[in-house]
Every structure is written in structure tokens, then in C-alpha cells.
Image (cartoon, rainbow, N blue to C red):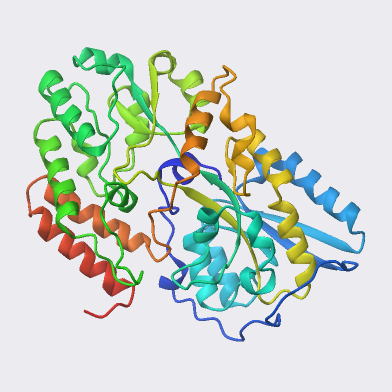
Amino acid sequence: MLTRRDLMTGGSLTGLLLLSGCGLQPTGGPTVASGPIGTDIELEGAIRFQTWNLRSAYLEYFEGLIDEFVAAHPGASVDWVDQPADGYADNLQVDASNLDLPDVMNLAPDLAWPLAQAGLLLDIADARPEVLDGYADGAIEDYSGPQAGTAFAYPWYLNTGPIFYNRALFEEAGLDPDDPPTTWDELFDLADAMGDAVDGRFYMIGQLPAIADFGMYGVQVLDDNQERFTFNDERAVRMVERYRQAYERKGLLPDSTVLTYTGGGERFQSGQVALSTGSAYDVANFKENAPDLYANLGITETLTDTGHANMFSQGIAVSSRTEHPEVAIAFAEFLTSQEKQMEFAHIVDVFPSTEGALEDPYFTEDDGSDTSEVRVVAAGQLDSARNYTPVVWTEEMRVELQRQVGDAVVGRITAQEALDASVAQANRLAGVSE
């Protein structure tokens, strides 16, 4: 699914319930035998391929890709099903419960993980171990879960975003537009300064921190065993307290403390917020719908105190119950090959997950176009980027974190109380005993 939130700012598909929290209890187990599976045979069989809200914008690409695959393998056929964005997780749950998942499917890590736990996805590391060497390590980790030596999907496209800021608002607040923040604490300092200068006419920060932001601030979100949530340490408390200070000094948009608030990007576009996460995917939108912002658009690298930017990814999984595993595997590998990922990246402003692909001049050289500067900045971050949102992080956990942090920011509770409550609830939802 290609939306601004999923590609750039939301991390792990915020707004969808994790399937394991929705009563997913499939029975029957896999039908594909464990062990290596070869595809150097005459492929025969029909498979169903499911994507997520891609048909309307990318029909020609996918139809051409499928035609090319079938032309090379006349005994195979691919039925492409594109599901709408709304209800995608619910549809997956129904298909999983009925043991009727598509043979090949587009999944993000948080949707793939519960299916893998239920034994419904083919372990690529078991079936095709030699193939995984062709993908970037960081991308594979997104689909490995806590257990090492497994991979429940092929990495497909990746994204990360630089920071956009409004140079005109920086100047109006007396800040240097050529010196944007490079660390979180610098951001908080500038937020305080902006709030002092403009007294609520606009704000530096437009939303509360997500779990990935805690990770980029240097908080250890999970323990060393990747089992228990731990984002209530001293550094996490400091981050929440800096948000509270920004709120008190009018550097943080007050609406961001409302539980249902999701409008940081829109407020940035309208000129009410001076800084926002973003990507090349947004530049054309700014040019068309916010010309004043576009004329004053500043671009800098993602804020991270760890040296690693946040990465978002989409993968291609194969059902463990497919009747034609060779065809499904061959098609998944064709779709996620470097050639096809590069083609897709030129169409969509996303990044390929294959090893070495980001060394292409398309990702390293600014050609002067509207999107190339953002593309080059973002691509430069991906080599060391990581996904700070654990695959076990759910929508319920996200809501609880936003609720508690919002209460702390407006002064109803302390930062420590907010984080302790959020961590306790996250561990309960993850099934971790006290």
C-alpha cells in the first residue's frame, strides 16, 4: 500500500490491528514440505497474487510484469487480486482463518509476523537459503522476527524519509534556515525558541512521538532477548519531558495531544507546523497543493541519536499451503528481483531492497529534478537504517502509548508514570508475564 503514512511516517502500518490480536487461530498447518525447494524446472500451475491498494495507480506495471513472467513460463498463470486499503487486515484474517490465503501476498512486517507464527507462511530461509544473500541484511531482518535463522517473506520495497522544514517559518521565528536540527535535543531546543518567539502563531513540532521515535532517540524499545518492552528507562523519560517542555513553551502543536489526532503532515502543509518527516513521494504534492511551502521547502536528514535512520518496508510472502510452491516462489523472486525492483522504484519513489541496488546513480546523484534531492538524501540513509518498530507492536499498543504520553505532556501524570503504564500494557498484550 503506497500512502504517505505507510511509506514515510507511520512505521508499521498504524491503524491496522495485528492479526494475532484478532482471534486468529488457524488449524491444519502447512502443506508445503520443509527443506529446499528448486525452481529450475518446467513451472506449471495457477497461483493467486494479492497486493494492497496498487491497481489504480500501477495497473500497467503489474500487468506487464505478470505477462512477462507467464511468457517465460507458459505452464504457469497468475491471478492478480488487489485489495483496497480499508479492511486489508480484516480480509487477511478471514483468509487465514479459512486457510485460504493467496499463494503470494504483499505484507508489511507487522501483518506478516502473526501469519508466520501461525505457520501459514513459507520460511524462505528454509526453502531458498541461497537466494536471501541477494537482499540487504537490514531488509531481511524486518521479516525474521525474534527467532534468528528464519525469514517469513522476501523483502520488497523500502523507504525512509528525510526531514522537511519550512524555511520561511524558521526565519520568521528568528531561527537560521540554513542550520536545521540534526539531533532530537537540537529539535527540542529550536521548538522552545520558536515557541518563545511566535507565541503559538505556528509550532515547530506537530505530533507526539511514536515508538520508532523513541528508538531513534536512543531508547532500547525491547530487551536483549527481543521479548519484553523496555521503553520506560531514563532516556525515554527525558524524551517525554522534553515534549512536555515544548508543549508548555508553545513549540508543540496543542492538538497533537488529542488521542485521535493524526494531522501532523496536514498541519505542516498548511503552514501551522514548521517541521515534518517526509519523502520524495510528498514533493509533487507540495508543489501542486502548497506552492508557498514548496517555494520555502528545506530538506535535511532524519533526526536520529543512534546514527541509524528509521526504515519502513513491504515484503512478498508465500503461503505455506500453496499447491504450487515452485510457481509461487519463482514469481515472488521475479517480482522482488533487482531488475523489477529498480523498475518499480523509478515509478513510485521507493527504494529497492536488493543488495547493492542503492549504489545506482539514480539514488546517488542529484539530477536537479523536484524529487532527486530528497531521493538522494533518503537513499543515503538506508544503508545503515533499521526498523525501530518491533513486529510485535500492535495498534492497541500504539493507542495506549499515545494516550499516556499525551496525558504526561499536558501534565495530568508524570513522564515516568506514563511510560510505566504503557510498557506494562504492551507487555500484557504481547503475552509477557510480569
Instruction: Pinpoint residue 132: horizontal percent, then vertical percent.
Output: 64, 61
The image quadrant that residue 426 belongs to is: bottom left
Above or below 176: residue 415: below
Above or below 285: residue 134: below
The image quadrant that residue 126 belongs to is: bottom right
Instruction: Pinpoint residue 134: horizontal percent, then vertical percent.
Output: 66, 55
Report whether residue 253 is seen. no
Instruction: Pinpoint residue 156: horizontal percent, then vertical percent.
Output: 61, 52
Residue 393 is left or right of residue 100, and the answer is: left
Residue 95 is left or right of residue 233, and the answer is: right
Above or below 59: residue 95: below
Decide which of 410, 359 is in the foreground and name it.
359
Instruction: Pinpoint residue 147: horizontal percent, then vertical percent.
Output: 47, 73
Look at 40% across and 71% down and name the residue there. Answer: 21
Look at 31% across and 52% down and name the residue there. Answer: 215
Dividing the image into 4 quarters, which one contains the C terminus?
bottom left
Count all numbered tags in the image, as a single digit.
0
Report whether residue 98 is seen. yes
Which residue is farthest bottom? 28
Look at 31% across and 64% down and name the residue there. Answer: 222
Look at 28% across and 59% down and name the residue there. Answer: 220
Decide which of 392, 99 is in the foreground and name it.
392
